[in-house]
Image (spheres, helix red, strand yellow):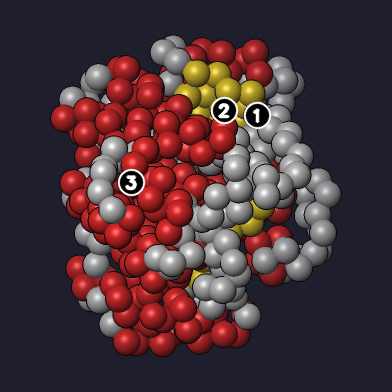
Amino acid sequence: MFNNFTLQNPVKVIFGKGSIAQLPKNIPANAKVMLTYGGGSIFSNGVHEQVINALTGYDVIEFGGIEANPTFETLMAAVEVARKEHVTFLLAVGGGSVLDGTKFMSVAIPFEGGDEWNNIVKRKAKYGEALPIGAVMTLPATGSEMNSIAVISKKETDEKFGMGHPLLYPQFSILDPETTYSLPKRQVANGVADAFTHVMEQYLTYPVGAEIQDRFAEGILQTLISVGQKTIANPEDYEARANLFWAATVALNGWISVGVPQDWATHQIGHELTALHGIDHARSLAIILPHLMRYKLEDKKEKMIQYALRVWELSGTDEELVEGAIQRTIDFYESLGIPTSGKAYGIGDATINEIVKRFEERGSAFGEHGDIDAKAASDILKMSI
Ligand code: NZQ
Ligand code: ZN
């Protein structure tokens, strides 16, 4: 059944060439701004300079070094500085990791309860306050620019958890496709694969007669299939960059998840692979999804057939369509240079046993039927190696 839903997405998206210049219209003039960034890509591609020029006259401090898969440890160092300096506005400049990390900081800075890992990331405490955030996003992938999710890692324990809360929406996100020209091919491929998998998590479940969400999801998938290769072949194709950016944003901004069942088991298992093996987020997903599709073939059959017919425009018997759906998904990841087998990363029994242990301890059960538990995760991982 098409489920009831409430949708409220407050993010102001400022999209297009030269849009970084609009920063001053969107940050209060008397703000004490903390500009957060990652490993330095914003210096080599000129984005830092554009931001600093736009912020002439503002009181700005900077915190750099937020890693890919942002760590609690680094973020708490940033939180300490922000508290000491009485920062009032956070501006994340970079990819999903910088923005996710900044979202965590926005809640952690005013939080007075201590133990921020358990209380904030693992949601043991209620929090009702957050500093405002703006973003200059430079990597189409996560959709973090228009959602209220952050994914945080902990170095000490090799853990990775997602957190979601309405306070985590950025106030605005600036998306200038030209800032993405400098992305290495590997990151473009990762971004396409991540956004593709976001759509699959919300689409490839079972039909509930949600026509708009289905057609919209299929349109995003087809767009990603087409612009991914175009972008890799011609990094300065503005139109391809713009379409890729907007596709990645709407893949996880709430529009296609309303009223429909969702899976997310691929992401949950993938997070464990990143936490334990340091595998790039998008790459961890490609190790799981095709095998999960086969494992859940009966439950997902109707949607797999729809996906084969509408997204890949295949024809044949139901069995041929289901096989085609799995094979095209594998071919898609592999065409981006992303392996679809755990073997490529040396994943073996030790990793699988650790993931089973974690899922059992947490009582985890994901998927649209809530049945991807420790045993199912183990079966899927074994199919992948
Ligand atoms: O750190 P710098 O030097 O900036 O370099 C980054 C990093 O090395 C580089 N980069 C970013 N923009 C660039 C650039 N290099 C050149 N030119 C540019 N314009 O790319 C590398 C990867 O950046 P990162 O931010 O880690 O990538 P991504 O945006 O894919 O974010 C991944 C993180 O987001 C989480 C993932 O788990 C992972 O931690 N996710 C967040 C979600 C959300 N908030 O909704 C959902 C996703 O499923 C995902 O889990
Ligand atoms: Zn993802």
Q: Earlier in the sequence, mark 2 or mark 1?
A: 1
Residue at the (75%, 44%) spot, across then down: 4
- Kindly identify which residue carries mark 2: 173
Quarter of the rendering occupied by the C terminus: bottom left
Element at label 3: helix
Say few, some or many: other residues with alpha carbon within 10 Å of mark 3 (under 14 / 14 to 19 / 20 or more).
many
Residue lying at the far left in this picture: please name it.
Answer: 233
Q: Quadrant of residue 235?
A: top left
Q: Is residue 89 above or below residue 4?
A: above
Of residues 91 and 141, the one drawn nearer to the viewer in this rendering: 141
Q: Position of residue 144 (x, y in %)?
A: 54, 41
Label 1 and label 3: CA atoms lie apart by 33 Å
- The answer to whether residue 18 is left or right of residue 318 is right
Q: CA distance from mark 3 to mark 2?
A: 34 Å
Residue 39 or residue 206, whichever sits in front: 206
Q: Which residue is found at the position 61% from the left and 30% from the top?
A: 134
Q: Amino acid at mark 1?
A: Val
Q: Amino acid at mark 3?
A: Ala
Q: For the residue with label 1, is its CB less than 8 Å from the closest atom of ligand 1?
A: no
Mark before the other along the chain sequence, 1 or 3: 1
Q: Residue at x 71, y 17 (%)?
A: 29
Q: Earlier in the sequence, mark 3 or mark 2?
A: 2
Quickly name the residue at label 1: 11
Residue at mark 3: 308
Q: Position of residue 25 (x, y in %)?
A: 65, 13
